Amino acid sequence: MNKRHNSFYLIHKALRVAMYEMATALQHADFADVLTTETTIQQLEELLLLFDSHALGEDHFFNEPLKAKEPAIAKMFEKEHEEDHRLAAVLQQLIVSWRYASTDDKRLEYGQLLCYAFNEFIAFNLYHMNKEEMKLNEALWRNYTDEQILATEQTLVSQIPPEKMMKYAHWLVRGLNMKDLLGWLTPIRQNAPASVFDALFAIAQKHLPTSKYNSLAKQLARPQTTSVL
Ligand SMILES: [Fe+2]
């Protein structure tokens, strides 16, 4: 197991679980039922915004500086983000077509196309994120120390607006195991303002199963809950 710092490890787990849960929601959706499905579609739009912001952050903070040292690798990942953007644009166009469809048959047809397009989006992103955690990380590790990589990651995270950070936090809570949750929240508890930690911890309380939340609360010395979540 490589002991170097993997800047993408936690956030990619969050983004993967967001895609898995969305894929299930889309498979369950009745695209002729406009009112119910609109909620799922809005969640899909939010997911696309998170992926877009994430790719922009990676390009700005990792790929652009890497161009001076390893131009071929940096450009390859920027190109992959362009493909990611194209796949998201296909989904956005299908969302518009579904919203403006005039019959149930048309809504069902666009819904099916939307599911296929989302499968392509997932397939591409699963492959792409693996590649970043292997090939891009190898290039970062060759050229920077772990302290430099961690400092870049902290700069990237610090420029995320609080409202968007809470959306990422929702998927971090859904996507991480206990060790990851402790690794994510412990330094925040030690270094960030109490209000930031409290807001993140409230998301954990809301979205974790009771037993997992209680285990986390115990290890962070926070009040446990007996409510059924
Ligand atoms: Fe990426």
Image (tube, helix red, strand yellow):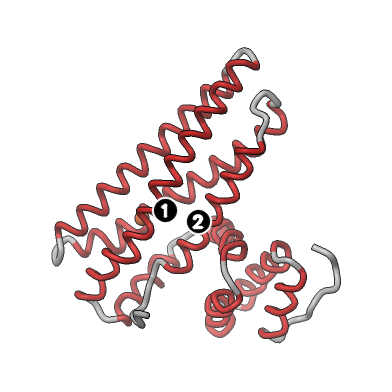
Residue at 40% x, 50% y is: 125
| 74 left or right, relative to 12 | left
Task: Ligand 1: give its quadrant.
Answer: bottom left
Tag on residue 139?
A: none
Residue matched to label 2: 16
Tag on residue 126?
A: 1
Image vertical order of residue 86 relative to residue 226, above or below = above
How many numbered circles does the render carry? 2
Residue at 55% x, 56% y is: 17
Residue at 79% x, 78% y is: 224
| Contact flag, marks 2 and 1 (Cβ < 8 Å) | yes
Residue at 65% x, 33% y is: 38
The type of residue carrying mark 2 is Arg
The type of residue carrying mark 1 is Leu
Return the x and y of residue 122 as percentages of the image width and height. Answer: 45, 46
Foreground residue, 119 or 191?
A: 119
| 196 left or right, relative to 13 | right
Among numbered discs 2 and 1, the one appearing first in the sequence: 2
Q: Quadrant of the C terminus?
A: bottom right
Image vertical order of residue 112 relative to residue 79, above or below = above
Image vertical order of residue 69 relative to residue 189, above or below = above
